[in-house]
Image (cartoon, rainbow, N blue to C red):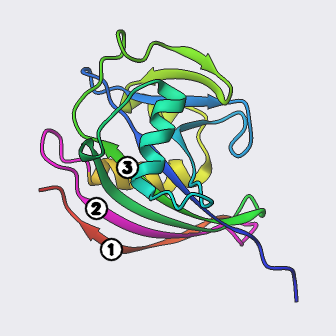
C-alpha cells in the first residue's frame, strides 16, 4: 500500500478593486510555480488559527491590507485529492466584500511569492492558471459571484489522481443572495 499523502489546510482570497479586477499572484514558488493564483496560504495549525484568521493574515502579509473579519465571506470549500501528486488540500475560499483601492492600497508589485497584478475577470481565460482553477474553481466562483449582492456558497471535491485528467463533483451549491 502506498504511503498516505499529507493533508494541508489553506485559504484562497478573492480580492477585487473598484473596477472589478481580481488581484492575483504570478507565482515564483511552489505550489503552482509559473501560474497565477489568488492570494492565500496554509493555516497556522500551531496557533489554532481559524480559516478566516488565516485569510486575514495572508491578505495582510501578501497585499498589505488590514481587513476586519466581517469583510471576509466564506464562499466555498474545495477539497483537492492528490493535487500535483504531492498532497491533499482543503481550501477555504474567501471573497473580500466590497472593493479595495488598487492604486492606493495594493499597487502591482513583487513579493516573495511572485508578482502581484490586477486582472479583469475576462482575462482569466488567457492567463496561465492551474488546471483545477481554470476548469472548476473559477467557473464556480463566477457562478456564485452575486455582483453587488452577497456572494453564494459552494463545496467541491476535485480528484487529481487520474493522470489522464481531473474529475470533480459539486457537493453543495447555494446561489448568491
Q: Which residue is mark 1?
A: 172
Seen at 51% across and 39% down, the residue is 58
Circle nearer the N terminus (1, 2): 2
Quadrant in which the N terminus appears: bottom right
Seen at 78% across and 62% down, the residue is 86
Please state if 135 lies on the left or on the right of 30 as rendered. Answer: left
- Residue 94: image x %, image y %? 37, 49
Q: How many marks?
A: 3
- The reply to whether dot 1 and dot 2 touch (C-beta < 8 Å) is yes
Few, some or many residues within 10 Å of mark 1 (<14, 14–19, 20+):
few
Q: CA distance from mark 1 to mark 3?
A: 16 Å
Q: Secondary structure at mark 3?
A: strand
- The reply to whether dot 3 and dot 2 touch (C-beta < 8 Å) is no
Give the number of the disc on residue 94.
Answer: 3
Q: Which residue is mark 2?
A: 153
Q: Residue furthest top?
A: 103
Q: CA distance from mark 3 to mark 2?
A: 10 Å
Q: Secondary structure at mark 1?
A: strand
Please state if 159 lies on the left or on the right of 50 as rendered. Answer: right
Q: CA distance from mark 1 to mark 2?
A: 8 Å
Which stretch appears magenta? 145-164
> Eyeballing the image, is 81 above or below 123?
below
- Residue 34: image x %, image y %? 71, 33
**Residue 57 is inside the magenta segment:** no
Q: Secondary structure at mark 2?
A: strand
Circle nearer the N terminus (3, 2): 3
Give the number of the disc on residue 110.
Answer: none
- Residue 15: image x %, image y %? 37, 34
Prevailing secondary structure class for the magenta stretch in the rendered image: loop
Amino acid at each position: 500500500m502506498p504511503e498516505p499523502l499529507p493533508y494541508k489546510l489553506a485559504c484562497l482570497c478573492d480580492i477585487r478593486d473598484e473596477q472589478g479586477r481580481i488581484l492575483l499572484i504570478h507565482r515564483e514558488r511552489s505550489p503552482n510555480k509559473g501560474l497565477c493564483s489568488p492570494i492565500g496560504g496554509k493555516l497556522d495549525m500551531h496557533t489554532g488559527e481559524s480559516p478566516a484568521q488565516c485569510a486575514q493574515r495572508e491578505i495582510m502579509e501578501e497585499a498589505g491590507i488590514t481587513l476586519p473579519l466581517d469583510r471576509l465571506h466564506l464562499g466555498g470549500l474545495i477539497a483537492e485529492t492528490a493535487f500535483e501528486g504531492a498532497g491533499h488540500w482543503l481550501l477555504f475560499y474567501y471573497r473580500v466584500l466590497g472593493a479595495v483601492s488598487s492604486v492606493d492600497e495594493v499597487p502591482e508589485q513583487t513579493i516573495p511569492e511572485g508578482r502581484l497584478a490586477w486582472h479583469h475577470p475576462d482575462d482569466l481565460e488567457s492567463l496561465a492558471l492551474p488546471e483545477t482553477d481554470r476548469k472548476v474553481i473559477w467557473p464556480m466562483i463566477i457562478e456564485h459571484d452575486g455582483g453587488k449582492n452577497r456572494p453564494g456558497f459552494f463545496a467541491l471535491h476535485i480528484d487529481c489522481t487520474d493522470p489522464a485528467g481531473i474529475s470533480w463533483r459539486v457537493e453543495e451549491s447555494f446561489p448568491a443572495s
